[in-house]
Amino acid sequence: MFRSDDNLPAIGPYFLSKLYSTSPRFFPLYEYSQNTRIVLFRGSRIKGVDRLILKLIPLYLKLFARKFDKYKWLLLFSTKWSLGMSCNQILHFDDPEYNEKELLDIQEWEDYTRKRGVKTQIICTTNYTRNYLIDNGVVSKVKIIPQGHSVQTLPNQFFRKSIIEKSTKLRLVYASPAIDIQGDVHGGHINWDASVLLREIWPKLQDTDRFELHLLGKVGPNARKILNFESVVEHGLVSISDCSSILQTCDIGLYPRVKDNFRQAQKISEYIGAGLAIVAFRLIDTSLVEELGVGISVNSKDDFVHSILELDEDREQLEKLKKASRQSAIKLQWSYLAAQLDQISR
């Protein structure tokens, strides 16, 4: 409000809640940007205040539109935030719903900005989303910037570890804020129900006594009842930095979710950042696994189990996949991705 001038070309409003975890994508992307002035709105621990602040942000932007218009680019999470603005605009389109209303909002935003002589660009995370927008008549340039990871010190991409001996148990890991089954708080949730892993996949692996399962997240009471903790290590809900450190001690990252949101799953990038081989169901959400050659994508639960058993038998192949992850991790660092954002908003 009080800044008279600025040498940065881009500005981005951002809301940071105190009640709920922030997006592991957007805030790091903004923080590592060298071109972006962040206008940070902080939430409250009082319930209901966050919602009020979010409703007031468009009013704030409208009141100080002249301030924002001094910048070359405005970074947006919602097309509604652009009303009254006359600067060029970049829309982050990372959580698409793929419905008519969403497309109509984007088309109206493009019509509105075009009439004001304003340039527009859209950033998404997958080829699928980019093609969807183009195929549905979106005229803005669409740039793909994938999800990044939180690992600060990367595993050495050139260092070839000795092949893990067959006598050593492989460490499998699954990370999720909630790890529940039916009867737990998030039982049935498309992302946080872990029934496929805990009831259908893991029982077929733990009987071999060749694996150790590490769970990063809050395990529900019903989920805990069915686990044998002689072969399961429960780390609980930990910080992002601790999560990254624990992931790096494991061998295979698991993505046992069968529901496809047709977005890019940030968890996959975290596994890659930690230098893990990955076994996942073949989804748009997990497309990086095949694109980067860092793991095995499968179509069935039986194939999921079989792929893990194969990697246990072929430790050299396991190391090749882990090495591919270590090499790919460099281009998924937030500093690298933020540099791509800065190329757009120069």
Image (cartoon, rainbow, N blue to C red):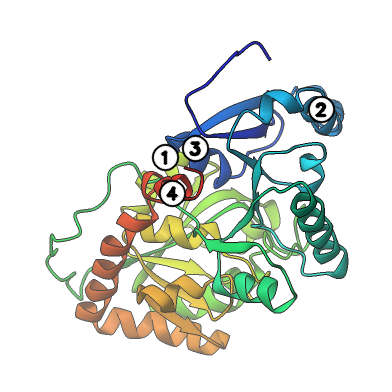
Q: Earlier in the sequence, mark 4 or mark 2?
A: 2
Q: Nearer the viewer, residue 315 or 67?
A: 67
Marks 2 and 3, Cα distance to the nearest angstrom?
26 Å
- The x and y percentages for residue 268 are 48, 63
Q: Say whether marks 3 and 1 touch (CB < 8 Å).
A: yes
The residue that disc 1 covers is 242
As drawn, the residue found furthest toward the top would be 2
- Please give the residue where the numbered disc 4 appears in the rendered image: 343
| Spot occupied by residue 181 in the image (x, y as percentages of width and height) | 70, 63
**Element carrying mark 3:** loop
Q: What amino acid type should be assigned to the residue bearing mark 3?
A: Ser
Vertical relation: 65 (above or below) 244: above
> Residue placed at 14% from the left, 63% from the top?
161
Q: 326 and 10: which one is in front?
A: 10
Question: Which label is found at residue 239?
Answer: 3
**Among the two numbered marks 3 and 4 on one chain, the one whose residue lies closer to the N terminus:** 3
The residue shown at (47%, 81%) is 297
